[in-house]
Amino acid sequence: MVKLRCYLRTILLIAIGLSWFSVAMADLSDGLVAYYPFNGNAQDANGNGNNGTVNGATLTEDRLGNPQNAYSFDGNDHIQFNTPVVQHFPPYSVSLWVKYDAVPDVNAYIIANGGQTGSSQGLCLLVVGASQVYCGHSYPTGAVSFGVGNQAYNFRVAITAGMTSGQWHHVTGTWDGPRLALYIDGQLAQTDVCGWGTEFGQPQNMRIGAPSNTLNYFLNGQLDDVRFYNRVLSECEIKTLYTGEDECDEGQISSDDCWTVYDNGNLHIPCIKVKGPFAEDLHYEADMQYEPLSDPMTFQVTGAKPK
């Protein structure tokens, strides 16, 4: 491992060759593709025109007791969209509040743009109604499952605890390409990779409360504050959506194996990671210090080789 010792006044962007690492403050509007607060309707509050058509679902109180600010589904309702809203390729995140009334007898779909049957491929969140085993994981009734693909998911992950019927829960699913992650009430519940290949067909138009290609397997419960992002949300951003407070206000706002960014401007870089010529990870040990300045600058390392 090569040591790099640098003393910088500030670092906002670091590059090694053609590999760049962007440092930014947490922003819940960043990458927001569609947002449905359900404040009296199923319109996209983000302004991108991904509006939903309500079929039978009725407005109800949200988790905070505000009237007409969430939608209730009674087992034969859904909200239909004219687009998939989220495409079939990563990265993306879906975040929402859900309360299901009782453990279903069959799978109950919360959101889907990949079908229950057929060749359509997309994402889905559902409440497991029939205990199953996929990829070596047990999916008991009442668990919430997040997956991409169709019924025989290319990847699938589920939580097996922590969801209680009759109570509001915050659920977030993220997909960065190889890995799915599922968060319940701001906490990472499960992350996994389970693959039968990585090629995906086109998704279908989005449905909330039912699968995208069949009017069956309906949700019986309530939904609120549905969000779709074209990026993977960080853990502190997910906690912020859950608590309603800025969980990124202090401490870590972004990180990977080799760097951590704090919202007070501190940048900790014990190493630098780049992709090698054969897609392998190359790590460079780094010792960096800086003094905050208002003016950004760029730091670039070229020609370094790992041991």
Image (cartoon, rainbow, N blue to C red):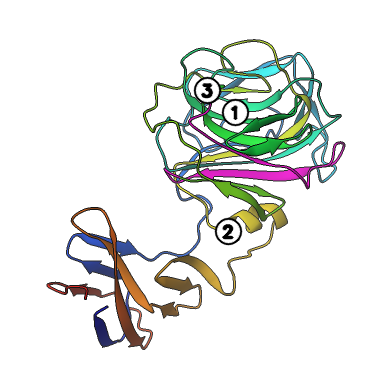
Q: Which residue is mark 1?
A: 43
Who's the residue at 18% across and 74% down the image? Answer: 301
Q: Is residue 223 magenta?
A: no
What is the C-alpha distance between the residues marked 1 and 2? 27 Å
Earlier in the chain: of badge 1 and badge 3, it is 1
Q: Looking at the rendering, which quadrant does residue 97 occupy?
A: top right
What is the C-alpha distance between the residues marked 3 and 2? 27 Å
Does any portion of residue 37 appear in the rendered image? no
Q: What is the magenta range?
A: 152-178
Q: Which mark is residue 85?
A: none
Residue 168 % position (x, y): 80, 42
165 versus 238 height, above or below: above
Q: Amino acid at mark 3?
A: Asn
Q: Amino acid at mark 2?
A: Glu
Q: Which residue is mark 2?
A: 235
What is the C-alpha distance between the residues marked 1 and 3? 27 Å
The residue carrying pointer 2 sits among few (fewer than 14), some (14 to 19) or many (20 or more) residues within 10 Å by Cα, namely: some
Q: Is residue 159 magenta?
A: yes
Residue 270 placement, left or right of 29: left
The quadrant of the image that shows the N terminus is: bottom left
The secondary element bearing badge 3 is classed as: loop
Does any portion of residue 63 appear in the rendered image? yes
Residue 53 % position (x, y): 61, 17
Earlier in the chain: of badge 1 and badge 2, it is 1
94 versus 258 height, above or below: above
**293 or 85: nearer the viewer:** 85
The quadrant of the image that shows the C terminus is: bottom left
The residue carrying pointer 3 sits among few (fewer than 14), some (14 to 19) or many (20 or more) residues within 10 Å by Cα, namely: many
Q: Which residue is mark 3?
A: 150
Q: Residue furthest left?
A: 303
Who's the residue at 26% across and 87% down the image? Answer: 6
